[in-house]
Amino acid sequence: MNLRDLHYLVAVADLRSFVQAAERCYISQPTLSMQIKKLEESLGVQIFERTNKKVLPTEIGEHIIASARRILQEIDIIKELAETAKDALSGNLRLGAFPTLSPYLFPQLVALIKQALPRIRLILVEEKTDDLIQQLKSGTLDVALLALPISEDFLESTALFDDAFLLAVQSDHSLAAKSIIGQSDLSGQQLLLLDEGHCLRGQALQVCQINGADEQQDVRATGLETLRQMVIAGTGMTFMPRIAIREYSAGIRYIPFEEPVPKRTIGLVWRKTSTRGVLINELKRLVQQAASV
């Protein structure tokens, strides 16, 4: 057994196809099939069930594949350690953020990273919070921008900036003329919120509870831009984080809240075992700079 065989094994498991796995690994399909067969014979177990239409891991195969993934991840860590020892501000940087933040922060941040860290190869990932935490845990992400607090023993975090919420209403709504929104203004109101799984949904529900408002039950959106368009269409009102507010959008008005202003705290999160402290410190500075643009 060698590392090449483990790569073949994981490719077949990922793609459920010997043909596609061979293409990924840049070898012929018969060669890959032969190597997997040899591996099974050497271990004395069947790793995959094979039919004309599909390939499925066996029960023992699932455990072997999981071990192969861990071994390959450890190899990547060894390589990364060696690279960062040579130059802490070079190599791959796998950065994640959730969907209600990434489209509004990444454009400014990418430009700053390109200028300040020219030897970094930036890989961006947009996923919901739970998925990002799992990717941090598995080692497929280096760092992530998340709404704090994050309660995970294996993670370290630091707050970078606060992102205040504003009330978004149609420009001819009865509240549109107000310069500031108070608790009594929201009492009894129904608001449009994001679908399940978005951290912003949970934050918005807390604001609703505090201010005596409720969720509009018959409509939910999958993203902030959909919420924005529904407000413009007169479907309802919503909370909008300041970072997502454009200087001018026809048909919509954004009104700030009175103190205490509802907000989310955005932080950088990474594994406690990470060896990229120098790069993480530089990234903190760049994220704060991007958020202030």
Image (tube, rainbow, N blue to C red):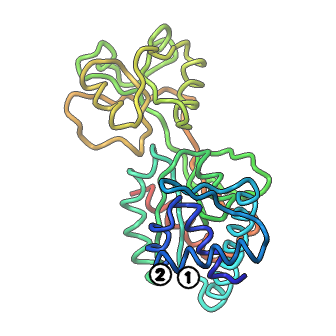
Distance from disc 1 to disc 2, alpha carbons, whole Å, reads 34 Å
User: Neighbour class for label 2 at 10 Å: few (<14), some, many (≥20)?
Assistant: few
Labels 1 and 2: the sequence-earlier one: 2
Q: Residue at x 68, y 67 (%)?
A: 69
State the image quarter where residue 155 is shown.
bottom right
Residue lying at the far bottom of the rendered structure:
86
Q: Position of residue 175 (x, y in %)?
A: 34, 16
Asked if 64 appears above or below 127 in the picture, the reply is: below
Contact, CB < 8 Å: mark 1 with mark 2?
Answer: no
Looking at the rendered structure, the kind of residue marked 2 is Ile
With 46 as the anchor, is 97 left or right in this view?
A: left
With 142 as the anchor, is 20 left or right in this view?
A: left
- What label sits on residue 27 in the rendered view? 2
Looking at the rendered structure, the kind of residue marked 1 is Leu
Q: Quadrant of the C terminus?
A: bottom left
Residue lying at the far top of the rendered structure:
188
Asked if 167 appears above or below 96 in the picture, the reply is: above
Q: Position of residue 127 (x, y in %)?
A: 51, 49
Q: Residue at x 40, y 29 (%)?
A: 221
Q: Secondary structure at mark 1?
A: loop
Q: Secondary structure at mark 2?
A: loop
User: Neighbour class for label 1 at 10 Å: few (<14), some, many (≥20)?
Assistant: many
Of residues 181 and 3, the one drawn nearer to the viewer in this rendering: 3
Q: Residue at x 59, y 61 (%)?
A: 13
The residue tagged 1 is: 89
With 255 as the anchor, is 287 left or right in this view?
A: right
Asked if 139 appears above or below 145 in the picture, the reply is: below
Asked if 177 appears above or below 38 in the picture, the reply is: above
Residue lying at the far left of the rendered structure:
250
